[in-house]
Amino acid sequence: MFTRYIFALMVAVLFAGVGNAAEEEKSPDWNATTLTGDWGGARSSLYNKGIDIGLTHKSDVLSNTSGGIKRGTAWLGHTEARIKMDLEKLWGWNTTSAYIHYHSQLGSKFNTNYVGGFVGVDNIEAATNTAQLYHAWLQKSFSDDRLSVLAGLYPIDSEFYVTDTSGVFIQPPYGMANDMAQSGQNGPPIYPIGALAVRMKYTSPGRNFYLQGALADGVPGDPNNPHGTHIQLNKGDGTLSIVEFGYTPQAEEPPFEAAKPGELIEPEQKVHEEHESFNKTAIGFWRYSSRFDDLDPAAVDALGNPLRHISQGAYFLAERTLFVEKDHPAQGLSGFVRFGTASRDIHQADWTGSLGLRYHGLCPGRDDDIAGIAVTENHTSSKYRLLNTADSSETDVEITYRAQIRPWLALQPTLQYIINPNMDPLLKNAWIVGARLEVAF
């Protein structure tokens, strides 16, 4: 039923856009940046009325050459459609925006069938192949965009625990880190599932500091039916709360126009930027209101009931531009570091940490390409290690190079090395090679 309402809103918005246009503004060059172009001028017309439509597809081919569960090669696919709406332009709703994101997952379960890693090897792999809504929310801004309130279907990994410099990597922990991704009855509201949520964000007048918090359904989707979109608030689901405080010092002349609160941008897809700069430090805390079973199924409390604990954690992240090429301000080296903890009596990993480097424009004549190297350490909780005779950690390394063939087409080879997959002493270290093809339609 919820999905029907969303699609009805999409149809209403598109028909509303056919009316008289507001004052036109310069729209993106769709013919240059997308495969399908401007659709005979329809795309620009919709954009000038406040409707921005994006369509992308990613196809990954990965091969496990040694170690893990078994050797083999598989294909994975991910297709998404996004509509951003400026409702002030569209319907006269001051400082109000909406966003709808629908996606589908296809192909093999490569990590599940071939590698068996705790972290995973591909950030488009999902447990079930299905199509579903990922975002469907409204946002209202106040006080010159310094305060915003968002409500609707929302994944927290779109704004929390985010470092833009890590977005180029194909391995999953450079989106939402695994210390939090492992939590919850059906996972937290992160890719590929959003949850009903309310998010508030405040940015200081100089935009040097921000404070944001969200309260979401504790069990996103339907654990018993992973197909399609499901919104349900069942008794006992509880809530997930998360808060993040960040420091983002602004240069006197911002290197590029900052995104408005809640606006989603894929930094690795920016092409021909005049400048590029990263400077962010943040800490965050998360907690579920419901309790979860102890890792030891035999553990009981004083009354003989199964022992249950609060699931919670904290994290720290930082990213910096390390240097910029003198004659090419869009090119240079950036780096990130992330560290997070989770309750050791409930989770397989009690802390994870990652760090990485990315270079925009490493090779002469390839100004829009991005090269990166990153490593993630996942530390096994002492209780899980004892109960499962597990290794003390899993370490994941990725080297990647995103070649921007055309503004709408990218090819990205990846080389990965997984040490102690899933902390399982029976699994040998795994080598993975592969590539991603990404198309913007």
Image: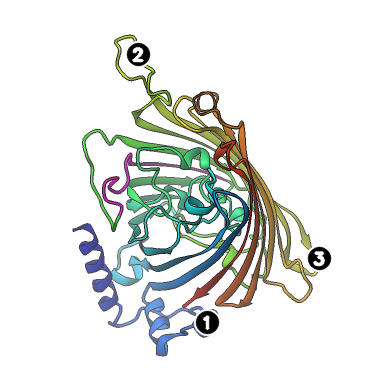
Front position among marks 2 and 3: 2
User: CA–CA distance between discs 2 and 1?
Assistant: 63 Å
Left or right of 321 on screen, residue 13: left
Which residue is labeled 1 in the image? 29
Q: Who comes first in sequence, dot 2 or dot 3?
A: 2
Q: Indicate the amino acid at tag 3.
A: Lys
Q: Earlier in the sequence, mark 3 or mark 1?
A: 1
**For mark 2, what is the residue?**
301
Q: Which residue, given by chain and number where applicable, does mark 3 sit on?
A: 326
The furthest residue to the top = 302
In magenta segment, residue 331: no
Residue ID at (30%, 49%): 221
Query: Is 199 placed left or right of 437 in the picture?
Result: left
Mark closer to the observer (2, 1):
2
Q: Is residue 1 above or below residue 320?
A: below
Which residue occupies the foreground of this view, 34 or 283?
34
Where residue 389 appears, as percent x and y from the top left, is 55, 28
Q: Quadrant of the N terminus?
A: bottom left
Whether tag 2 and tag 1 are in contact, CB under 8 A, the answer is: no
Given the image, on which type of amino acid does mark 1 rest?
A: Asp
Distance from disc 2 to disc 3, alpha carbons, whole Å, reads 63 Å
